[in-house]
Image: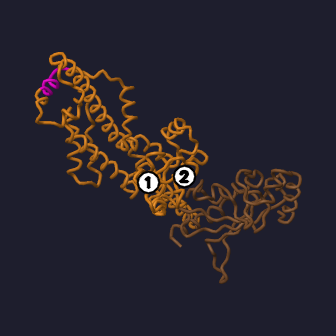
Amino acid sequence: MTFNIDKELITLPIHQNTIKEYNEQLRYPPSMFNNNYNIDFKTQTKQLLETYIDCYIAGIVDLANSTSKINKLGGNYIKYLHIQYANNTVLKNKLEQFKTDYKNISKDISTDNLTLDYIVNDENYYFSQLLNNIVSTEGSSTSTDTDFNNYCKNLNDPLLKVFKCLPLLLKDPMCVLPDDEENNINNNDDDDVKVAGGTIELTCPITCRPYAYPMISRKCNHVFDKDGLTNYFQSNEDGNQIKCPQGACKAYLTMSDFIKDDIMDLRCKIYKNISKKNKLNKNNDNINDVIL
Amino acid sequence: MSSLCLQRLQEERKKWRKDHPFGFWAKPTKNSDGSLNMQRWDAGIPGKENTIWGQGCFPITIEYPNDYPSKPPKVKFPAGFYHPNVYPSGTICLSILNESQDWRPAITLKQIVLGIQSLLENPNPNSPAQEPAWRAFSRNIKEYETKVLEQARKYPK
């Protein structure tokens, strides 16, 4: 598996070192124990994507015309996840093999507590020696694409989700995403996502204004603006869990159940940009009318 | 008044003016100096067609507390209003208007008025709020219907 090293990234207004480091990461794909890679690559990809979106908001780049670049960035990210996944499965299989072998030699010692994380993170432990032996022996991943897709679904990686829905949101920032529909069916709860005539509302149900800082409940997926939530939870003096602000939702929540909703944020940014463009076009039309 | 309360009420007003259910009306009251009092609204709930409530449009007042929308508004019919779930003071007994029951900040004015309209023809006999209407509704439905029709004539559409 090879990565797409993107020389065009240089056109972005971003620090040259970030691009250099990103391309550097692509040259040396993840190894089984390189945890740093994990963090760095994710951060860099996120930073690059955010720069793209910021440039789009500022009107410097047209995202719709640079989908190929976004796809490259997203493609690299998926490949990276795939390598990581393959490495993990190989390692897991090897570990199981190792455990069985070890049990056969010494029946007295329990291997129940021997997890992957434990071995990898414990450098002084004598297992590290054995570990090198495990890694150096041949092994191949038996995982299929379906396994990988399921893995991605369970991973619930926000960055992956942004890459997946960006093309759809660019076409229609208020569209219902396939994932949301799935959630609705699974939860058997018709007001899980606020849907009005097949569109997602871009205003907070508490403040009734366009989102400034949208936050999503990890328990029930309802989205509210930070201001509205702060106000709601402040009114509850004893700090216990209180009912979700959405009508008829049965979840009990505190402020800590909410995280920033990147997708809703993206929807609002794209929507704002589209309406700004439409306004400009209208003004231009009016000017033309006057001239004619 | 908190800034959120005022902001939310201004948005509610905008939304209502843009679109509201047929036959209903709602507007903020006016202070003595002519300025709008956003925290106190007057509104009208039409009875559903082809019911004993159908001939009337019933006035309510909506009072929004300072900590709205965290706390629900207080909604009242005129004192002495004839309905099993309306207190003698006119206060409406409805779960979505009760903070300890089903009130949530996301409930809109539209949902409130539609909820009240539905309560008119579907009283909840398990939470009586006044003696006369509740007694008639559960024991003498003919008397109940006559009284309701009489009241509807008092508040014609």
Element under disc 2: loop
Sequence-wise, which precedes: disc 1 or disc 2?
Answer: 2
**In this picture, residue A222 sits left or right of residue A162:** right
Q: Which residue sits at x=50%, y=59%?
A: A210
Q: What residue occupies the far bottom of the structure in this picture? A: B33
Q: CA distance from mark 1 to mark 2?
A: 14 Å
Q: Which mark is residue A246?
A: 2
Given residues A280 and A170, the one toward you in this image is A170
Give the vertical position of A10 relative to B155 (above or below): above
Q: Which chain is brown?
A: B
Q: Mark 1 or 2, which is nearer the eye?
A: 1
Give the vertical position of B117 relative to A186 (above or below): below
Q: Which residues are magenta?
A: A130-138
Task: Using the image, name the chain to which the residue with label 1 belongs.
Answer: A
**In this picture, residue B131 sits left or right of residue A221:** right
Q: Which residue is mark 1?
A: A254
Q: Which chain is orange?
A: A
Q: What residue occupies the far top of the structure in this picture? A: A104
Give the vertical position of A243 relative to A3 (above or below): below
Task: Using the image, name the chain to which the residue with label 2 belongs.
Answer: A
Q: Quadrant of residue A88?
A: top left
**In this picture, residue B20 sits left or right of residue B82:** left
Given residues A180 and A98, the one toward you in this image is A98
Q: Quadrant of residue A287?
A: bottom right
**In this picture, residue A3 sits left or right of residue A136:** right
Q: Which mark is residue B83?
A: none
* Residue B151 position within the rendered picture, expressed as x and y whole percent measured from the top left: 84, 62
